Image (cartoon, rainbow, N blue to C red):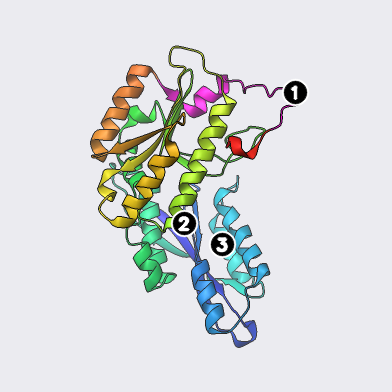
Amino acid sequence: MKTYFTIVQYAPNPHREEYFGIGLFMVSPESGEVIVRFSRNRVSRINNALNIRKSSLLESAIRKLELFEKAPEALDVKQLEYLSAYENGVIRFTLPKPLVFDVSSEVSPSVVMAERFGLLYSKLIDDERETRSQSLRGQEPGVKFRKYAKQCQELGSHLDIGYKFATNNFAADTLIPDITVDFIGGNGALYCGNFINLKLQPATVQKNIAETQFLYKVLLSLFDGGGEQSHPDCKIIIDDKQLDDRQAKQAMHSIERSVNGELYTLKRVPDMKRYVESVLEEVKTRNIQKFTRWIKKQQFKPIPENRQCLFDEF
């Protein structure tokens, strides 16, 4: 598989022509996939070292560049070459370089590309502090689940694996968080699950939990039941192998309290491969359909007239 990567460089003072790598682009001409990541921590450390105030213009530029990952039309090599020839003040782009790697039949190209991107980002962009926090990248429970799930074609015929809620593939006149769930389908009601990585920074764990909870509540408010399996089955999933340190256990206690009494449930997984096998058996027994297929036949719940939506509902 052939990909191309470009380093995004930051020049705190363009006149001195001193550039620091703060971001990385990787594109695949074969699949059209684009991966983008920036290190805002590195920008902050550079600014602190040089006594430079935070730039809202730089942050705005980074946010616009991050949108390339979600753009309807994939970023191609020619566009990367154009960016490398175009300097915009404090930001510049290096000439794209090719990176070729083998993809076995047992692993999807997307998974391999993500792993190679992580290694390259670690080598070219992040520093020792970020490397420590990213040392488990590629071993997150969601990544492990998707790896096993994508090896099973039969499971992929029942569920969308790694489904991203974005405006280009889910049209709903409502506020949907732009996040990815690890699997989703439906038959009469929603069937979905999302893994929470407990080994991230506490603030990030809380943010991921809150986004997943909010997403589930919005989804459960959108669709009527009906059919044989009308009870929604939305899961927040924890890999038990993560519960080996104090921080992860504290996060687990927080999750247990937050799901008490909710329509979605907490699922703990002691063995990932066996869990994938159990999900396959369940979706076959319940005849679960892929979400992208099932949603086309659904109607959104009507919103009563003069109804006010309160924040505490979510």
Disc 1 packing (10 Å; few <14; some 14–19; many ≥20): few
- The single residue placed furthest to the top in the displayed view is 228
Dot 1 amino acid type? Glu
User: In the rendered image, which quarter is residue 55 located in?
Assistant: bottom right
Residue pointed to by mark 2: 203
The magenta region covers 288-308
Disc 2 packing (10 Å; few <14; some 14–19; many ≥20): few
Q: Residue 41 location, x and y as percent? A: 50, 69
Identify which residue is drawn at 57% across, 59% down.
Answer: 78
- How far apart marks 1 and 3 lie (CA) works out to 50 Å
Identify which residue is drawn at 53% across, 28% down.
Answer: 220
- How far apart marks 1 and 2 lie (CA) works out to 38 Å
Residue pointed to by mark 1: 305
Dot 2 amino acid type? Ala
Q: Secondary structure at mark 3?
A: helix
**Contact, mark 1 vs mark 3 (Cβ under 8 Å):** no
Towards the viewer: 54 or 287: 54
Residue pointed to by mark 3: 80
Q: Is residue 276 above or below residue 198?
A: above
Q: Disc 2 or 3, which lies upstream in sequence?
A: 3
Dot 3 amino acid type? Leu
Q: Residue 254 location, x and y as percent? A: 40, 46
Whether residue 207 is visible to the viewer of this picture, yes or no, is yes
Whether residue 195 is visible to the viewer of this picture, yes or no, is no
Q: Is residue 145 magenta?
A: no
